[in-house]
Amino acid sequence: MASNVHVRQSGDGPAFWVLNGLYEVKASSDETNGAMTVMEMTVPVGGGPPPHTHSGTESVYVIEGTLRYHIGDETFEGGPGSFFHIPEGTVERFEPTSTARLLVTYTPGGVDKFFAEVGETAQRRELPPHSDTPPDVDRLTEIGKRHGIQMRPMPDA
């Protein structure tokens, strides 16, 4: 098999619990020579990240569930089969309106290192025990800066 081929079976590879969600690495930056990071994310209702930008692009495919996606000044509803491509530097965030399973591709790669640093290693391939403790946004912001992610404040409700 060629040295640049990457194969990962279901349940293989690193997995992290982040913001009450399960984030599984399908292809890391190291495995793609920095070209991309591919993640499968399972995020419960009310989960999802604060508004942020990336130093690269993000493409999101909804496998299961529903979400509300805020991209720039627009809001979109998405369900199974929906696809979103977010250009570099665009402020974005998503809110699952049901438990959502997503396939997310980041180019270039490297964001897997952010999730490894902010999360904890998943003990099981399922959502973590729910935490009512609010996320440490200052910690997320500081770690994000090291990985090309700029966190923004949540909009007023």
Image (cartoon, helix red, strand yellow):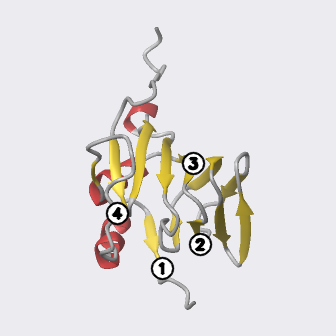
Q: CA distance from mark 1 to mark 4?
A: 24 Å
* Residue 1 position within the rendered picture, expressed as x and y whole percent measured from the top left: 46, 8
Of the numbered discs 3 and 4, the one sitting upstream in the chain is 3
| Dot 4 crowding, Cα within 10 Å, few <14, some 14–19, many 20+ | few
Element marked by disc 4 = loop
Q: Say which amino acid is labelled 4.
A: His
Q: CA distance from mark 1 to mark 3?
A: 22 Å
Q: Say which amino acid is labelled 2.
A: Val
Element marked by disc 1 = loop
| Residue indicated by mark 2 | 91
| Residue indicated by mark 1 | 152
Quarter of the image containing the C terminus?
A: bottom right
Q: Nearer the viewer, residue 131 or 91?
A: 131
Of the numbered discs 4 and 2, the one sitting upstream in the chain is 2
Q: Nearer the viewer, mark 3 or mark 4?
A: 4
Q: Nearer the viewer, mark 4 or mark 2?
A: 4
* Residue 13 position within the rendered picture, expressed as x and y whole percent measured from the top left: 36, 33
Q: CA distance from mark 4 to mark 2?
A: 27 Å
* Residue 41 position within the rendered picture, expressed as x and y whole percent measured from the top left: 49, 49
For the point 37% across and 66% down, the residue is 144
Q: Is residue 53 above or below residue 65?
A: below
| Residue indicated by mark 4 | 130
Q: Nearer the viewer, mark 1 or mark 4?
A: 4
Q: Say which amino acid is labelled 1.
A: Arg
| Residue indicated by mark 3 | 102
